[in-house]
Image (cartoon, rainbow, N blue to C red):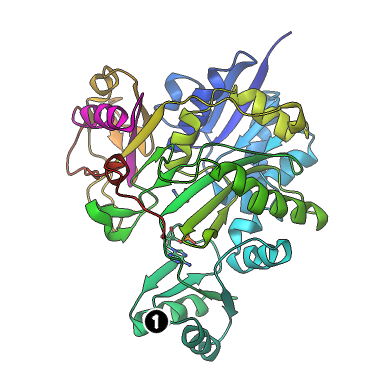
């Protein structure tokens, strides 16, 4: 029997990781990425796609290549309804409908679903006027957490002790068309990401990961899309993934189905592990980036088989996920000026020598080929260096030895990814 042709939509390190794992599945004959990137191009066929939210353009590729499964990586096409258009045309899609992707697209909607499903999360007020914001800030106290309701590419959330800063951010969010802002209770505790694969009914969780959102060592500086990650989390309860399915993901998925908007895809549960137990910080409608890459690095269940079953409503056929006991560490190499003003067009060297380090591979996040075919930076986060090892220390060591091989003018990375965990310094509550 011929295997599947799988189309991956997106162009970052997450999509490179997905393409890599899909290509390794014997049930998959070919992986196509749209638009992909130079790293994906070495393992899959890349099809031009100017705009990942252009559903007709994605549909045209899916039709032309008669693909068997479409995996949508980023949130923007999901929220824009690309999965809906593909499903209406008869394709199997791993990725939620626009309606279900509102779990990520609107923080107010996510809060409402969590309340209906009795999911533990921060207390919150949804505000549409400065007066409501002031009342909410007063009610919930400091530190203040103020969130833009809509998608904001990681820039929508301000956590501060400064009341003026909280009010200013809220005012900026309210000033947008249809502006709404969510003011919520501060959650104290280390963060974890749990990625749940679901067909809308059955839910299977990958091993928890931790992401490093701030640009600098010691969690200094501005927020980014994520500067690195590791998995598993030895400091977290051993049953965290099961607990998240039972208390959070399954009730949420059941509530979405009950509303007539089943969620099919990856439900990203962003948690704070507080002294009172795990609380949801956010939902996303996709795998994390860079945290998804370490959870996927540990997955031994063939990815194509898993995502096909989810897209086809047959996830119950997969009894449990097979997980590699190894530790995985991902260190992101970012461009000069990231996150404020990333510079692009810098030459990248050393990727091949980085990959000569045992148990290391390099995922392309923001890269391109210049007119001479040389690899250059093309985004804020440029490369992900992923290492596995029998211990966290071994995986960290391999990752950083590989990072040292990479040359990117003005590039920077955090030197403390997974360090506190390795030292046993991460504690709950
Ligand atoms: P979000 O976009 O909701 O993930 O928020 C971005 C980051 O802001 C999170 O990763 C947390 O570090 C922080 N954050 C969000 N909500 C809270 C909260 N209720 N309490 C403390 N920190 C938060
Ligand atoms: N690493 C955070 C995210 O993917 O949203």
Find out whether residue 399 is within the magenta segment: yes
Find out whether residue 69 is within the magenta segment: no
Q: Where residue 154 sits in the image (x, y, percent)?
A: 43, 58
Q: Is residue 361 above or below residue 118?
A: above
Look at the numbered disc 1 and say if its residue's Cβ is closer than 8 Å to ligand 1: no
Q: Where residue 42 sits in the image (x, y, percent)?
A: 42, 20
Q: Is residue 1 above or below residue 5?
A: above
Q: Which quarter of the picture shows residue 162? A: bottom left
Q: Which quarter of the picture shows residue 196? A: top right
Q: Which quarter of the picture shows residue 308? A: top right
Total marks in image: 1
Regarding mark 1 in the picture, which secondary structure is present there? helix
Q: Where residue 420 sits in the image (x, y, percent)?
A: 28, 46
> Is 395 left or right of 131, judged from the image as shown?
left
Residue 334 seen? no
Residue nearest the viewer, comparing 330 with 362: 330
Q: Name the quadrant of the N terminus.
A: top right
> Is 70 left or right of 212, judged from the image as shown?
right
Crowd tier of the residue under label 1, counting other residues whose Cα lies within 10 Å: few below 14, some 14–19, many 20 or above: few
Q: Name the quadrant of the C terminus.
A: bottom left
> Is 164 left or right of 324, judged from the image as shown?
left
Q: Residue at x 67, y 48 (%)?
A: 246
Q: Residue furthest top?
A: 1
Q: Residue at x 76, y 27 (%)?
A: 317
Magenta residues span 380-404
Residue nearest the viewer, comparing 417 with 152: 417
Residue labelled with disc 1? 168
Q: Where residue 91 sits in the image (x, y, percent)?
A: 75, 33
Q: Is residue 125 above or below residue 409?
A: below
Residue nearest the viewer, comparing 416 with 94: 416
């Amino acid at each position: 029997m011929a295997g599947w042709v799988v189309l991956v939509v997106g162009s970052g390190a997450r999509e490179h990781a997905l393409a890599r794992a899909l290509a390794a599945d014997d049930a998959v004959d070919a992986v196509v990425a749209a638009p992909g990137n130079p790293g994906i191009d070495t393992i899959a066929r890349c099809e031009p796609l100017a705009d990942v939210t252009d559903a007709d353009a994605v549909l045209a590729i899916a039709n032309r290549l008669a693909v068997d499964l479409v995996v949508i990586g980023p949130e923007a096409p999901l929220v824009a309804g690309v999965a809906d258009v593909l499903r209406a045309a008869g394709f199997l899609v791993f990725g939620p409908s626009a309606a279900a992707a509102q779990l990520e697209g609107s923080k107010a909607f996510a809060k409402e679903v969590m309340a209906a499903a009795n999911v533990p999360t921060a207390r919150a007020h949804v505000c549409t006027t400065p007066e409501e914001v002031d009342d909410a800030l007063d009610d919930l106290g400091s530190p203040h957490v103020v969130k833009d309701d809509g998608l904001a590419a990681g820039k929508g959330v301000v956590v501060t002790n400064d009341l003026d800063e909280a009010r200013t951010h809220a005012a900026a969010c309210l000033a947008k068309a249809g502006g709404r802002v969510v003011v919520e209770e501060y959650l104290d505790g280390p963060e974890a990401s749990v990625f749940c694969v679901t067909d809308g009914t059955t839910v299977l969780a990958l091993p928890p990961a931790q992401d490093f959102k701030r640009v600098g060592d010691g969690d200094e500086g501005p927020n980014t899309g994520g500067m690195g990650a590791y998995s598993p989390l030895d400091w977290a309860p051993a049953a965290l993934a099961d607990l998240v399915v039972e208390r959070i993901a399954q009730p949420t998925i059941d509530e979405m189905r009950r509303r007539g908007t089943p969620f099919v895809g990856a439900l990203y549960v962003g948690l704070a592990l507080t002294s009172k137990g795990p609380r949801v910080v956010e939902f996303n409608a996709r795998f994390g980036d860079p945290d998804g890459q370490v959870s996927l690095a540990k997955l031994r269940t063939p990815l194509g088989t898993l995502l096909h079953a989810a897209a086809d409503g047959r996830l119950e056929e997969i009894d449990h996920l097979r997980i590699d006991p190894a530790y995985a560490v991902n260190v992101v190499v970012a461009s000069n000026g990231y996150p404020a003003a990333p510079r692009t067009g810098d030459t990248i060297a050393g990727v091949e020598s980085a990959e000569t380090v045992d148990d290391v591979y390099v995922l392309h996040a923001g890269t391109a080929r210049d007119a001479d075919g040389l690899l250059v930076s093309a985004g804020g986060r440029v490369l992900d260096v992923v290492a596995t090892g029998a211990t966290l220390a071994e995986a960290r060591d391999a990752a950083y030895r590989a990072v040292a091989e990479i040359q990117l003018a003005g590039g920077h990375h955090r030197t403390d990814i997974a360090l506190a965990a390795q030292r046993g310094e991460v504690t709950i509550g």
